């Protein structure tokens, strides 16, 4: 959770056409951009450099950059999204990563995997199978990261949940914030787990970024739990990205 750089991408007007499981309203670009500016400023406030990529109108979901790659200290891996409309985002991300990394590898397929299903902890890489991430995608990533000395463990994303990290996030090397429904699967046995407050499941997607925990605004009980556990929390308006099933982790690549 200690990072010197992040990559983000500004939302484009086409974001109103972004993918969503359920239609709960059209995102407002102005409000989303304002929240995005707050997000980027918060990352920068920790001393990190933030590379802000321009909007991509051809890809409505392109601001959710996390899904396009896995960034590890040793190298980066370009993903192969399970959502057909998002496939082209990967090639758009590649030049930015090539400029930052000596070693850039890619999921060649035929499997699929999205970054939102990958949680890197202090000791392993957890990958949740989901509607977007299949066994072949996980197996291909396992081969790549084992070359770099990492252990990968395949786990499962609860039904109806978009990505594994929709329901969890890393708070420090050994501590995970998770919904009770995900933790009940046993995938975090051996870790210290903090649960989101009942009814606040949507608070599970946070990011620990250097000294801060960025979390979506509007979940006061979970914010208080994190505060009492000693984390320095910054709340960011996520109302517009939430309409597209997006959250704090989706909006950046961190390394
Ligand atoms: C999608 O359905 O792909 C986007 N609307 C949301 C992606 C969120 N990304 C993430 O959780 N890593």
Image (cartoon, rainbow, N blue to C red):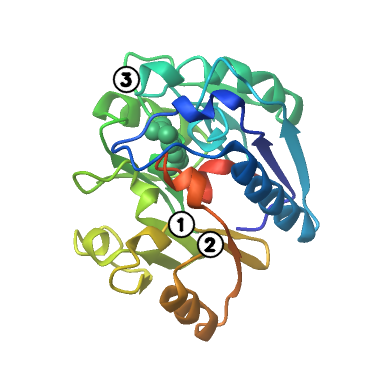
Residue at 74% in and 50% down? 4
Q: Position of residue 65 (x, y in %)?
A: 56, 33
Indicate the position of residue 220 as horizontal and vertical percent values: 46, 75
Q: Residues within 10 Å of mark 1 (few under 14, many from 20)?
A: few
Q: Nearer the viewer, residue 100 or 64?
A: 64
Of the image marks 3 and 2, the number of the one nearer the N terminus: 3
Identify the residue at horizontal 33%, vertical 62% (top origin).
201
Residue 102, how many percent across, how many down? 71, 27
- Residue 253 visible? The answer is no
- Ligand 1 falls in which quarter? top left
> Which label sits on residue 187?
none
Residue at coordinates 41% horizontally, 45% vertically from top-left? 151
Q: Is mark 1 within 8 Å of ligand 1?
A: no
Cα distance between the residues tagged 3 and 2: 31 Å
Q: Is residue 88 above or below residue 17?
A: above
Residue 237, above or below 177: above
Q: Is mark 3 within 8 Å of ligand 1?
A: no
Residue pictured at 38% horizontal, 50% vertical:
166
- Sort mark 3 into few (<14), some (14-19) or many (20+) by Cα contacts within 10 Å: many
Question: In the figure, is residue 80 to the left or right of 44?
Answer: left
Q: Earlier in the sequence, mark 2 or mark 1?
A: 1
Q: Which residue is mark 1?
A: 123
> Residue at label 3?
111
> Which one is in front in this view, the residue at disc 3 or the one at disc 1?
3
User: In which quadrant is the C terminus drawn?
Assistant: top right
Q: Is mark 2 within 8 Å of ligand 1?
A: no
**Residue on which the image places disc 2:** 215
Q: Secondary structure at mark 2?
A: strand
Which quadrant is home to the N terminus?
Answer: bottom right
The mark that comes first in sequence, 3 or 1, is 3
Q: Is residue 112 left or right of residue 70?
A: left
């Amino acid at each position: 959770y200690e990072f010197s750089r992040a990559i983000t991408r500004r939302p484009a007007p086409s974001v109103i056409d972004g993918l969503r499981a359920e239609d709960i309203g059209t995102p407002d670009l102005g409000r989303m951009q304002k929240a995005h500016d707050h997000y980027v400023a918060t990352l920068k406030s920790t001393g990190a450099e933030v590379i802000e990529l321009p909007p991509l109108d051809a890809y409505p979901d392109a601001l959710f950059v996390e899904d396009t790659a896995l960034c590890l200290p040793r190298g980066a891996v370009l993903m192969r999204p399970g959502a057909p409309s998002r496939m082209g985002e990967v090639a758009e991300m590649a030049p930015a990563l090539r400029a930052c990394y000596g070693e850039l590898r890619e999921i060649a397929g035929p499997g699929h995997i999205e970054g939102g299903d990958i949680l890197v902890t202090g000791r392993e890489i957890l990958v949740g199978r989901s509607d977007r991430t299949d066994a072949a995608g996980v197996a291909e990533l396992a081969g790549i990261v084992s070359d770099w000395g990492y252990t990968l463990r395949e786990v499962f994303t609860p039904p109806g949940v978009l990505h594994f990290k929709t329901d969890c996030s890393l708070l420090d090397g050994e501590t995970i914030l998770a919904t009770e429904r995900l933790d009940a699967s046993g995938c975090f046995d051996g870790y210290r787990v903090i649960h989101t407050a009942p009814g606040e499941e949507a608070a599970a997607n946070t990011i620990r970024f250097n000294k801060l925990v960025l979390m979506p605004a509007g979940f006061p009980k979970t914010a208080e739990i994190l505060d009492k556990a000693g984390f320095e929390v910054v709340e960011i308006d996520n109302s517009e990205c939430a309409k597209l099933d997006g959250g704090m982790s989706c909006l950046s690549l961190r390394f």
